Image: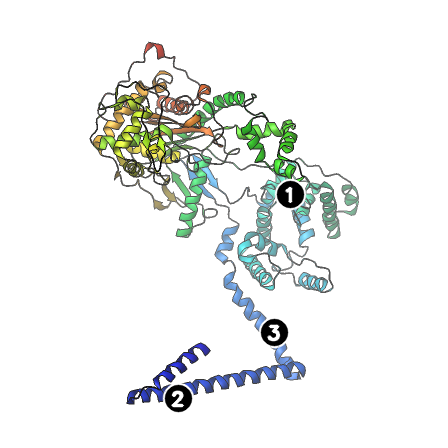
Amino acid sequence: MHRRFGTIRRFVHCAATVNHPYVSLFRELCARWVNRVRWLAGAAGTKARGLFRAALRGIRHPTRRGVVLTLAALPVLSLAYTLALVPFTPRLGDIRKARVDRPALILSADGNVLAEFKPVNREWVTLAQISPHVVNALIATEDHRFYQHHGIDLRRVAAAALHTFTGSRQGGSTITQQLARNLYPDEIGRAPTLTRKLKEAITAFKIESVYSKDQILETYLNTVPFLYNAYGVEMAARTYFGKPAADLDVLESATLVGMLKANSAYNPVLNPDRALERRNTVLAQMVKYGKLSAHAYAWLKRQPINVNFEPQSEQVGAAPHFAAQLRKWLSAWADSHGYNIYSDGLVVRTAIDSRLQAMATQAVAWQTSQLQSIANGAWNERTGCWPGNALFQSFIRQTTEYRSARDTGLTDADAIRKLATDASFVEGLCHSKTQIQAGFVAMDPRNGDIKAWVGSRDFHDEPFDHVQQARRQPGSTFKAFVYGAAFADGAQPGDTIVDRNVAIPLKGTAVWKPTDPEPPTGRPMSLRDAFAFSRNRVTAQLMQREGAGKVATLARNMGVRESALDPVPSLALGTSPVTLREMVSAYCTIADRGAYVEPRMVTRIEDRNGNVLADFPAARPEPALPAAAALKLVDVMRDVVNRGTGSDIRTRFGIHADVGGKTGTTQDSTDSWFILIHPQLVAGAWVGFDDARVTLRSDYWGEGAHSALPVVGAFYDMALRARAIDSRAQLAPGSTTPATPRTGHARKRHHFLFWSF
């Protein structure tokens, strides 16, 4: 106001220097307006000062009328404030849903259950399935007038207020109020404020209006949190006593109810003495309110706490990594469409084939087990998990034990020396760093359906997803984009490039010199042979001809759409990290004659009654690579498995269908890849260690053909023999008869697993 008034005053002052009839009239109007504003401001200030003085006089010299009006106004204001909070508490419809555990059901394409999306690790049980000792202990300890009030116990509120006034705080919350806090921690909060208590009381009244007393008890006992990821009395009973809630005796019931006051403080596993004391307090309350005889109490209070502790893990289902990714997507979809994935009973039909998923899981487990035995041998020698190894010392420096040792004043050398003498520490660190990991995904190239997804060896031990989350260098599997770009520009598989040493200048004075395990021949090599035998020198020259930018653009168009690609010459050999999901999606583009189809997880969402809520048809194909170029690429990929680096697909696994593929291995065998294409199914695997500094050298099966290929080979062997895919399907016109393995390389076909699907 003062700033605006000053601006007007300055404007009027400037106008005073101009002599014009209209300006004079405007100046007069402005002067009148300014005087009016001054008068109003003065009047308002005078009135406010008068009211303030009157208020002070009322406080200093209260009258009977003033006291009566004040006392009458307080409940009115309190009621008005309480009513104003009602819209900020949970709605009755939401409260009705709270006690209904209808998690989203995730189904495979063939109708099998893959997962249930529960909010917490809980199994809902009815009140009849809970020991009556639990109910008696709960009511006696937490709310002995539970059946006499309607959500708020005014006697307890008054008693709690009196104790607080006298300096000893005492809780006044009923079971219904505690349930309100447990169900709606975000809406109500836990701050010790009047607003929070009012919201809690309003919600408690709403709960009492919707639920019966037994329903309130059932909901409370199923939603109350315990430690160790156990929610509800059923999971708590299994966790601490190894039995269902229906079988809990009075001592076990009192122990669990005693934990409700403070889970950590009265944890019978970590604090048995405090838990025993608290349990006996609960038993005394049961005696006080007639739920237990004094004679029984005298004997029970002397009994020890007998814990049978076993944390309960959640059921992960057949495709846990896929389900974890799907949960994120479904949560966003449900929020935008007004559904709750935990209580609305959604039925989500996915593209996963449960048979193929089981085959993929088995193939990953088999091959990683083979490789782990090799890794254990390699990393338990003096060159591996040995404190004298510089790499292992760097692992030690990353541990909390090392930091704690340094905090005590030890030098770096002394801290490492001290930890190196701890055999269990060394063994545990070695184990955590040298666990072989893998990722596998299979898609239908015709519609983008994701048919199988295995993100790691074991979801419990390694929830990190090596299909979607991990970005690793793809090695020679990226060469498909270099050759695809060349074929799109008119190159033919029979065209040749001299196999020679090359030096490609980079920015500044840097030079890139790609190498191969074999020395250069100095002779022309066809693109077909260069791709089949994965020659880096020839590929680098082809990349130089096509341009890194063009190759990067093609890779993005074909499916590598989330990872950043650095358009440098070395990109030809897969130096930019990507995800396995992107690479398999891009290879689907090759199998589908150059048309990219976005991967699809979900085909349909229904409600619990079978009504369709949403359909998700396959995405429209996008031209990414000319069909003629894609057919040439398919042709040279056949040679990879017929006679090149992927020939184990034919010789070792005996797969005679029309397939093509590509191996990939990065420097020091840090990352091993293999992707195989079939007209109806494209699958790829990555194998390696989470820490890229840990490697499985090529002489220990580190190459993609030895480590990643067997996962894919075993999977296709199972899929073809189970007729999950058609062995007669054709990728494209051309020679589909596998080359006869050379005598020196022929191997007996092995069936590594006994599978039945």
Q: Residues within 10 Å of mark 2 (few under 14, many from 20)?
A: few
Height in image: 596 above or below 743? below
**In the image shown, does 50 or 203 lie closer to the viewer?**
50
Residue corresponding to mark 2: 32
Residue under label 1, please give it.
131
The answer for how far apart the CA atoms under marks 2 and 3 are is 45 Å
Mark 1 neighbour class, 10 Å CA radius: few under 14, some 14 to 19, many 20 or more: some
Tag 3, which secondary structure? Answer: helix
What's under tag 3, amino acid-wise? Leu
Image spot of residue 221 (x, y percent):
60, 47
User: SS at mark 2?
Assistant: helix
Chain-order first, disc 2 or disc 3: 2
How far apart marks 1 and 2 lie (CA) works out to 84 Å
Neighbor class of circle 3 (other Cα within 10 Å; few <14, some 14-19, many 20+) is few
Q: Quadrant of the N terminus?
A: bottom left
Image height of 736 relative to 70, above or below: above
Occupied quadrant, residue 744? top left
In the image, farthest residue toward the front: 509
Q: Is residue 658 visible?
A: no
* Tag 3–tag 1 contact (CB < 8 Å): no
Disc 1 marks a residue whose amino acid type is Ser
Residue at point 36%, 42% (across, down): 604
Q: Is residue 224 left or right of residue 266?
A: left
Gap between marks 3 and 1 measured at Cα: 46 Å
Amino acid type at image mark 2 = Arg
Q: Which residue is mark 3?
A: 74
Q: Earlier in the sequence, mark 3 or mark 1?
A: 3
